[in-house]
Image: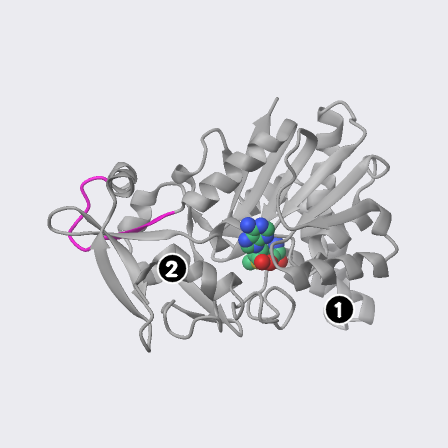
Amino acid sequence: MPPVRFDEFMDEALYGASGFYVGGARPAARGGDFATSPELGTLFARCVAGYLDRTWDELGQPDPFVVVEGGAGRGTLCRDVLAHVETCSHALQYVMVERVDWQRDEALARIADVGMSECAVAAPDLPAGPLVGVVLANELLDNLPFRLLEHSETDWQEVHVERAGREREVLRDAPADAAAMAEAVAPGVALSTRVPLQLKAAVWVRRALRSLERGRLLTFDYGVRRTAELAQRPQSEWLRTYWSQQRGHDPLGAPGTADITCDVAFDQLPPGATLSTQAEWLAAAGIGSMTADARALWQRKRSKPTAEALAARALLDEAAALTDPDGMGAFWAAEWRVG
Ligand SMILES: C[S@@+](CC[C@H](N)C(=O)[O-])C[C@H]1O[C@@H](n2cnc3c(N)ncnc32)[C@H](O)[C@@H]1O
């Protein structure tokens, strides 16, 4: 078989017939291959629910108020948001967009289990719109297949993957448009520097924005403001694999057995986003007041903790993980406003 471009290899390794997400791996669940903010507990969802209530007001209380979640996985964020929205709840129509069939089915079953079936539907792709509401995505953009380019002596080359026996990398001259893009986002870099081209993430954001007549697009993901920041670091730092909560960096190692993911370069996405760190966003969304009672209780009872005090401690630990400046707290919340 001729070598395929890295993004095509990644698409197959994650979403092909034996792909990581398709083969029944338990990606985002507790104890799965990696943990995400909505899977740590309900605090993240409570903050998102408050944001939806405020946005519904800002948009003039539309009915229906459509919330589309891209990469909804097993529906955890949807379930917990539906349980915590207040003022917008009667107008809210939640659409879980998930590419992988079994995850969509499981998400719908979990929403049915909590008696919320009439509030949510699932779809394999973004609705066309026009919608008035919010498009959300947590840790989706980093999972959309990207191209990999390497600066050579003469120009840019593109990483391909040869699948004869064991997978191995093959470099080919990059097409002119891809080379021009790489040069634009990472000009004048040193020999052998690599950068990702995240065209699918850019297209997904553009489609999400186009689906909105009025509203917001809000994404959470790890990444950097500028591709040039990635170009200064070795590929192993920004192209990662996850399996059983272990971090690796060889995407060709055993395709289908590990997640493959990349720091999102926000300068490759459509312009206009306001960026804040996840910690800043959660603080503005009120995570401090949501945990104030737990903090006070823990302070009072920490020397002789009751079951209630231990539950308070668990909530504080969850808040600490979500806002950790060396972890999820350093993710970016990116918000685009439409209309
Ligand atoms: C890292 S997981 C995050 C899941 C969930 N948002 C969370 O935070 O736990 C990324 C999810 O995006 C899904 N996905 C990937 N590409 C997609 C696409 N183009 N449209 C919808 N879902 C997609 C994957 O199947 C996977 O469930």
Residue type, mark 1 in image: Leu
Residue type, mark 2 in image: Leu
Question: Which residue in the structure is indicated by mark 1?
Answer: 310
Residue 76 among those drawn in magenta? no
- How far is the residue under mark 2 from the one under mark 1? 37 Å
Q: Is residue 297 above or below residue 89?
A: below
Looking at the rendering, the stretch of residues picked out in magenta corresponds to 187-197
Residue at the extreme bottom: 165
- Residue 123 percent coordinates (x, y): 68, 49
Question: Which residue in the structure is indicated by mark 2?
Answer: 239
Q: Is residue 51 above or below residue 143?
A: above
Q: Is residue 330 left or right of residue 64?
A: left
Residue drawn at point x = 48 percent, y = 28 percent? 272
- Residue 208 percent coordinates (x, y): 58, 37
- SS assignment at label 1: helix
Circle 1 Cα neighbour tier, 10 Å, few/some/many (<14 / 14–19 / ≥20): some
Q: Main secondary structure of the magenta part?
A: loop
Q: Is residue 233 left or right of residue 201?
A: left
